[in-house]
Image: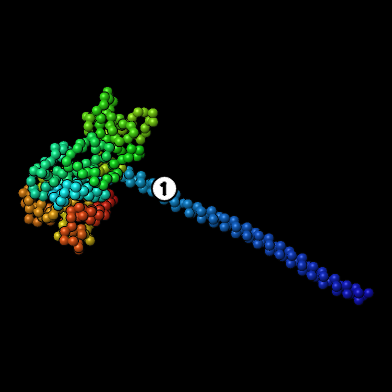
Amino acid sequence: MNSITAFHCYAICPNATLAARSSKDKAAKQKKAKHKKKKDKTITKEAAQLHVQAAGDQKAPNINNNIQAADNNIASENKGRPYTVSVAVPGSILNNAQSPELRTYLAGQIARALVIFEVDEVVIFDESGKTVNEDVGEFTGVTRKDYDPNKVLANILQYLECPQYLRKFFFPKHPDLRYAGLLNPLNSTHHMLIDEDVPYREGVTLDRPVGKKGSLVNCGMRKEVRIDRQLQSGLRVTVKLDSEQSSDSKTYKGTVVSADAPRMDAGIYWGYRVRVARSLGAAITECPYEGGYDLSIGTSDGGDSMEELNLSSFKHILIAFGGLSGLEAALESDESLRLSDIRLLFDYYLNTCPGQGSRIIRTEEAMLISLATIRPKVFAAAKSKLNK
C-alpha cells in the first residue's frame, strides 16, 4: 500500500506539477496576450493620433498658403505703385516696314511690349527734329504726301490701348486703322469683361437727361453707372464703383477718379498714355509729371554693361530707344540739344544685349530685351525707396 501510495504520490505529483505548470503557462500567456493587446491598442491609438496629426499637417500648409496668398494679394492691392515707367521711341521705325499691313503689325508689337512690362507712358518723338502735330486725339486722315509715321504710330497705339467697348465712341473709320483687325489683342488688365468683378472701370459719359443727378457712364457692364457729378458727354473717364450695389437699381453707382488711381491706390496696371514730341530733347524735357523724369536711361549697342548696375531711387523713369541709326542720329538733328556726347543726356547709357549675333537689333526687339533686362533693376530700386 505504501508502494501504491508512493506510486500514486509519484503519479499524482507529476500531474499536479504539470497542471500547475500548465496553469502558470496559461496565465502567463493570458497576461502576455493581455499586455500585447494593450500594447497593440496603445500603438493603434498612437498611430491614429499620428495619422490625424499627419492629416492635419498635410492640410495646414494649403490653408496657410491660401490665407497667405490672399493676404499678399490684399497687401499688394492696397500698397499700390507710386512710380511710373515711360518709354520714348521714334515714329520713324514704321518706315522700316514695307507695307501698311506690316507697319500696323509693327505698331501692334510695340503696344504688346508696353502692356507686358506695364509701361505707363509712351513718348513718340521725331528723330528728324521737325515739328509735328501733337494733337493726336482727332483723326484727320493722311495721304502719301502728308504721311507722318509719328502720328500713325500714335493713332494705332491709342486705338489698341482703348478698351474694346469704348472704341466705337472714340475711333471712327480711319486710314491708319484700316488693318487694325490683324493685330493681337493687348488683354490688358484695364480691358474688362462684361461681368468681371473689379473696383475700377473705364467708361464714356453719355448724352442722357439726368436732372440734378450725376451723369450716366457706359462702362461696358450690363447696367450703366451713375457717377457722383455731371460731366460733358463723350468724355472718357475712370470710375471707381461703390463697394455696395443695389440689385434692384437700374444703374450701378460709382465715383469719377483720376486715371492714376488704380495704379497708385490698388497697384492695378491701367494702360499707357500716348504723347508725341517734336524731338528727342522735347521727349525728355516736356514731361507731364510734376518734377519731370528723375531717372533717364538711353539704350545703345555702344552703351555700358548692365552686370553691376544698381539704379538710384526714382519716382518717374524714362527709357529711350533709337531708330535705325540709333539715338546718336536723333541728338545730331535736335537743334535744342547742344551736346557732343549722347551719354551726357541720360543718367545711364546701357547696352542691354551685349555680344549680339545680329548686326542690327530692331527697335521692337530692343524694347522687349531692354525692358525685360531693366525691369528687375527697376523693382529693386523702387523697393529700396519704399524701405527707406
Image-based side of 169 in relation to 286, left or right: right
The image quadrant that residue 246 belongs to is top left
Q: Which residue is mark 1?
A: 67
- Crowd tier of the residue under label 1, counting other residues whose Cα lies within 10 Å: few below 14, some 14–19, many 20 or above: few
Image-based side of 103 in relation to 13, left or right: left
Residue 65 visible in the displayed image: yes
Residue 82 percent coordinates (x, y): 25, 45
Residue sitting at x 63%, y 57%:
41
Residue sitting at x 27%, y 45%:
185
Residue 363 percent coordinates (x, y): 18, 53
Amino acid at pointer 1: Ile
Residue 218 percent coordinates (x, y): 28, 33
Residue 264 percent coordinates (x, y): 27, 43
Give the farthest residue toward the right: 1
Who is closer to the viewer here, 183 or 43?
183
Who is closer to the viewer here, 80 or 216?
216
- Say which element carries label 1: helix
Residue 283 visible in the displayed image: no
Q: Is residue 115 above or below residue 216?
A: below
The image quadrant that residue 174 belongs to is top left
Residue sitting at x 15%, y 51%:
98
Q: Is residue 364 above or below residue 251?
A: below
